[in-house]
Amino acid sequence: MMMIPMLLGGLALFIYGMDQMGQGLELLAGNKLQSILEKLTSNRILGILIGALVTAIVQSSSATTVMAVGFVSSKLITLNQAIYIVMGANIGTTVTGLILTLDIDLVAPIVAFIGMIMMLFMKKRKIKYTGTILFGFGVLFMGMKLMGDAVKPLSTNQDFVNLLAISKNPLIGILTGAIFTAIIQSSSATTGILIAFAANGVITFESTFYLILGSNIGTCITSMLATLNSSKDAKRVAVAHVTFNVIGTIVFTIFSLIFPITDWFKAFTPDVTRQIAFLHTVFNIATTIMLIPFTGMLAAIAKRVVPGVDERDKQLTLMYINPDNYRETIPTIAAVKQETLRMYDYAKENFDLAIKDLMDRKLDLGTKIQYNEEIIDYLNRQITNVSVKALQDNLNKAQYRQLSYYIKISSNIERLGDYAYNLMKLSNRLETEDLTFSDISKNELTEVISELEDLFNIVRDNLEENDFDMKSIKTKAYSISDSTRRNRDNSIQRIRHEICDPESGLIYDKAYTYILRLKDHLLNIANQHEDIFVY
């Protein structure tokens, strides 16, 4: 009767330990992991290596795949680049299985205890994060030991032995492994459980062969769930992930029916736990090598399964101007103005989203902000290109000055988008470093933000009406500068008297730097209109 509670408790400890170890490694690496994925995936081999490295660090192929899905959804990387990352993630996830073959049952509780002490009593973040890694590492092996002890009686249970014999059937074994892994959402956890069983003589390598193959399909459920509300390209990443593992499973199954693959693993090592871990590793490395030349095919299959274009992708176009034949749009200046207003609205929306993200980091608005930023950059390029072409025509003085104005303010609006994006990155920093603003700091910041929102709205209304109320604009801009100066001084005093955390204070001060830059560019839009706009 005690077997089931012990087994469930061991599984809980195992998964919790794996999660803690991954979190500690990720925190220790800081926020560099995502930037590495974003910047270093243009080459397929490099993309695969980066995917493997990041997964080995975070101890979760699901986490890496979800990152790739997010980057594709945000248009930071292409579908093909995401497929490279997924291939690498499948290799990186095998590190966990290899670690589990280590025999450290006796020292695992001591490692966990040392890690707990470091987590609870050390103040330096790097030491705390190292403690989290050690704690997770120890708890993971304690969970393995508990599961192993729980299932020992099953080795002599004939009914259970007969049940395992069924898993030697390819179809049943693959389906069982896929379903179980889909439930616990980790092929590494499935591998760990099978290693725990094998270490206690409960199962043989032959019984686990198809279960391991199926686990690689089941682990795709996380990426599928992550794309439910994402773009079509993000959904295609998940489809490519499933296709990759299904093809690998089919190939390995066919080979296992023709060749004595299990005997090859047994000849390599007599240890059944290592045979299981090596199978998991060889499957993913061999499948990756086999499919590297066919990345385009995986992408094509994914596009066939998920056809069409996203509604939101249709926003990444000009609504009022034909950039190839702009003279068909009459009048050109009015069309440029409408596109400029669109661009301004996206910048204002990003500012609003960034502030919400900064004040309530649970909202997770980064994907929307990233996408809006791409639209802003696109509109800036197109407005500039069309206006420059038009300036080469025979325009009168007033038309020339008006188009010149829209070129200048589109550049300022693009900078508004950049600083809104920078505010979002401050929010990410607060999240990564586990920092927060004090209530008084939040209240001060909210007041200044309210004034800046007013300035955004005044400039927007004036831009649409072609009539700028410079007195109101300059008064509001001065008030923002004055409030910023006062709040920064207050923040320094709070840090001096240890009312606020110095690291939070630095981020708080940086937020005001971006607020002042936003104010300056809004003021530039108004000043440039006053200087050159002529009817």
Image (spheres, rainbow, N blue to C red):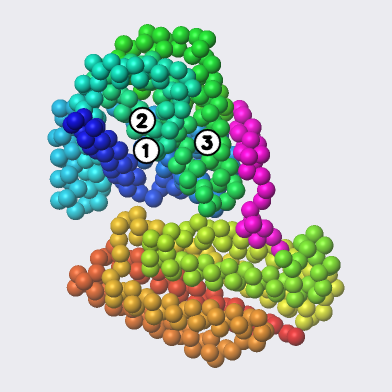
Task: Give whichever of 124, 79 is nearer the camera.
Answer: 79
> Between marks 1 and 3, how big is the CA–CA gap?
18 Å
Quarter of the picture containing the N terminus is top left
Q: CA distance from mark 2 to mark 1?
A: 8 Å
Mark 1 touches mark 3? (CB < 8 Å)? no
State the image coordinates of residue 186 (x, y, percent, origin top left): 38, 36
Residue at 24 percent of width and 69 percent of height:
500
Residue 390 lies left or right of residue 51; in this view the side is: right
| Magenta residues (range) | 293-318
Give above or below for 57 relative to 533: above
Q: Which mark is residue 190?
A: 2
Name the one closer to the observer, 299 or 85: 299
Dot 1 or dot 3: first in sequence order is 1
> Quarter of the image holding residue 2?
top left
Image location of residue 320, percent across then percent down = 74, 68
Q: Earlier in the sequence, mark 2 or mark 3?
A: 2
Q: Looking at the picture, which amino acid does disc 1 mark?
A: Ile
Q: Crowding at label 3, few (<14), some or many (≥20) Cα neighbours within 10 Å? A: many
Callout 1 secondary element: helix
Dominant SS in magenta: helix
Q: Is residue 301 above or below residue 512?
A: above
Circle 3 SS class: helix
Task: Say which residue appears at 34% left-offset and 78% top-offset.
Answer: 444
Q: Which residue is mark 3?
A: 241
Instruction: Provide the residue designation for mark 1.
Output: 184
The local crowd at label 1, few if under 14, some if 14 to 19, many if 20 or more residues have their Cα within 10 Å, is some
Determine contact: label 2, label 1, CB under 8 Å. yes
